[in-house]
Amino acid sequence: MTLDGAEARPTPSRRHPDAQLLSAFSGRLPGHLAGALLELRDPQPVWEAFRHNPQIGCPRCDARHPGGPVFRIFPHHRYVCTRHRYWIGPPDINRPGPFLDDLPEIVKAQRRHLRLLRRHGWAATYDAVLTAFMICGHHWDEREEMISLGISLQRAIWEQRVHVLIPSDTEHQAFSASRLFAAIYPEAIKIAEVLADPFWRQLAAGDDTQLRLFVVEIGRRIGDPSYQPRAEGDVIAHWIEQDCWRPPSPPLTTFAAATGHRRPGHLAKAVRAASLDRHKRATDWFIVSRRCGNIILHHRTVHPVVVREWSVQMEKYSGAIWWSQRTQHRFRETTERIGFRGLRYA
């Protein structure tokens, strides 16, 4: 992990460009070149705010660039091209994303995401959005008999979006985990607005009265006004007990700490070699079950909030997913003392 503002250091597979020589060779001003090469920016960017993997962006934005796909380094908060209503999504297998003309709520969610960023900064926003993705993934993966009517209706909305994003009989061509993130993105941002806010985090970590106020608000955000925390199998209760009072979890790695760059053609081949088998298994699972929460929870995008620095270490990642909805002491005691189950908060 690099510190904020640290330079991207040269490695055996990555050279550090000289701005003046590159400018003389290309005929472009160093400031213009810095738009394409982040290493040339002065001062250096906050690398933790950017994804470490290059990915394909909006094809309409990149249409003026000849020579094939354009790979970009996007910040963590960029999921949609709002100008062309195109889903960029988290780094996946670099399949083309869908246009969102039939799903305007996803485009609106990106604008809310940017407002959240301006209000709370990149670190709190990054942690909150990934935590919200994880919460939605757990709710989507939960057994039908275990969920409330509100969550069931929310899942029906997600499934409708999935049918738009990945129509039936096109799964082998259209499926990608990134499109599943698109299906839950509007609701994830609604939840993240609470998780990133210091006021609500303080209430969640506060006394019983403050916790009741937080429960009312988070229930409204997840689409379940009757939500009551559970001592077992509740990802929100786990967040209240283990995470809300701690600092945001950072990305696992950064672009500056990456081992080097590859040419776009080599990059595409490397992505296919590393991810094709996992993608095929996810596609087969999706075709058979259409249960998408498990795919979201296993995607590397949410790893930083499933396995946090203070999390109990598990041998397998599936164990970490299981642990992310468990409680230990504080919340079990609170539930027994004030009897959350069956109560309604005004």
Image (cartoon, rainbow, N blue to C red):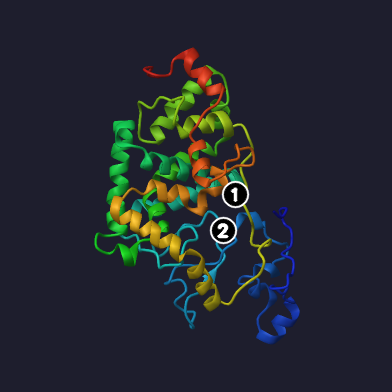
Position of 245 with respect to 321 (left or right) is: right
State which tag comes first along the sequence, 2 or 1.
2
Q: Which residue shows up at 64% across the image and 41% down it? A: 309
Residue at the disc numbered 1? 122
299, above or below 196, in the image: below
Residue at the disc numbered 2? 75
* Rendered location of residue 185, percent (x, y): 41, 49
Q: How many marks?
A: 2
Give the amino acid type for the residue marked by disc 1 in the picture.
Answer: Trp
- Answer whether residue 346 is visible to the viewer in this image: no
Query: Viewer-proximal residue, 35 or 164?
Result: 164
Query: Viewer-proximal residue, 298 or 247?
Result: 298
- Answer whether residue 138 is visible to the viewer in this image: yes
Instruction: Find residue 266 and report its image quarter.
Output: bottom right
Dot 1 alpha-carbon crowd within 10 angstroms: few under 14, some 14 to 19, many 20 or more: many
Give the amino acid type for the residue marked by disc 2 in the picture.
Answer: Pro
Position of 126 with respect to 280 (left or right) is: right
Q: Which residue shows up at 31% across the image and 33% down it? A: 150
* Rendered location of residue 336, percent (x, y): 48, 15
Of the numbered discs in the image, which one, if any, rests on residue 163?
none
Q: Secondary structure at mark 2?
A: loop
32, above or below 341, in the image: below
Residues at marks 2 and 1 touching, judged by CB atoms closer than 8 Å: yes
Q: Which residue shows up at 33% across the image and 31% down it? A: 146
